[in-house]
Image (cartoon, helix red, strand yellow):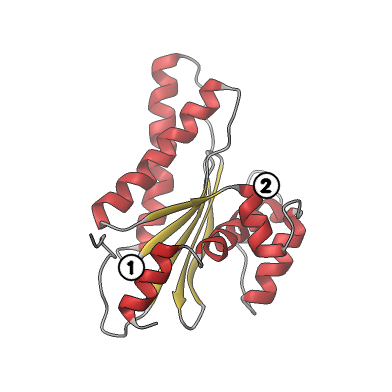
Amino acid sequence: MVFGIGPLNSQKNLFIAGYDPGTKYVGYSLVRFPERQIVCLGTVVTEKSNRKGSVRHAADINRRARNVWKEIWNAWRDLPNVICSETMPNLQNSTVRADLNYVAGSLVLYSEILDIPLLEATPMEIKQAACGKASASKEEVIAKMEALYPGVQWPTTVARGENSVEMASHAADSLAAIEACLRDPAVLAIKQLLCV
């Protein structure tokens, strides 16, 4: 059975999207292969509402998920042939876990709409693939992605006190997720199909 691979383009390029999940910070990227050219790279920042209450909370996380996906949808459009994502962390806080699942559900829906594979790797697998060690720091992942993608421009919008390392680390993690998935059988099959 052959799975969907998104839109086939006349240039026979492979577009791989990277995703670093979160509720406040969400990193995303889109890379064209074989050139290894970054098409888009960013970190979406969403703010929690100051309102209290369970009904308002549901409306607030829906608003935040919608904001994340509006930005990512506009950046990725319908280009990806595959999405590589960091797995959701195993959190003890059920509210935070539910919030992450709202945003992650949007990612699953996007991959289903485009009929493309959604691959996941754990944070340790991503660090191992990117830096050669599962305990790599944020700064080490950023440095390795700068080596793999010379001239990369990290997101620089620093609003409401976010620090630039935090902004860059989520975007870098989305690129590292791509690196972790490059040897996955689904990606290899798509590369062969597109002759990349």
Q: Residue at x 27, y 65 (%)?
A: 6
- Which of pointers 2 and 1 indicates the residue nearer the eye? 1
134 left or right, relative to 182: right
Q: Secondary structure at mark 2?
A: loop
Q: Return the x and y of residue 122 as percentages of the image width and height.
A: 58, 47
- Asked whether the beta carbons under mark 2 and mark 1 sit within 8 Å of each other, the answer is no
Q: Which mark is residue 79?
A: 1
Q: Is residue 196 above or below residue 179?
A: below
Tally of numbered discs: 2
| Residue at image point 36% right, 77% down | 192
Q: Quadrant of residue 76?
A: bottom left
Quick one: 126 or 185, which is closer to the camera?
A: 185
Q: Element under label 1? A: loop
Q: Earlier in the sequence, mark 2 or mark 1?
A: 1
The amino acid on which the numbered mark 2 sits, given as a three-letter code, is Glu
Callout 1: 10 Å neighbours few (<14), some, many (20+)? Answer: many
The image quadrant of residue 157 is bottom right
Residue at image location 32% in from the left, 79% down from the top: 194
Which residue has dot 2 on it?
162
Q: Is residue 137 above or below residue 67?
A: below
Q: Residue 108: image x %, image y %? A: 35, 45
Q: Is residue 164 above or below residue 66?
A: below
Would residue 23 be visible to someone looking at this image?
A: yes
Instruction: State left or right for residue 191 relative to residue 141.
Output: left
In three-dimensional space, the C-alpha distance between marks 2 and 1, rounded to whole angstroms, equals 30 Å
Q: Amino acid at mark 1?
A: Leu
Task: Answer with left or right where residue 132 lies relative to residue 76.
Answer: right
Q: Position of residue 133 (x, y in %)?
A: 74, 58
| 42 versus 65 height, above or below | below
Image quarter where the C terminus lies is bottom left
From the viewer's side, name the closer residue of 50 and 10.
10
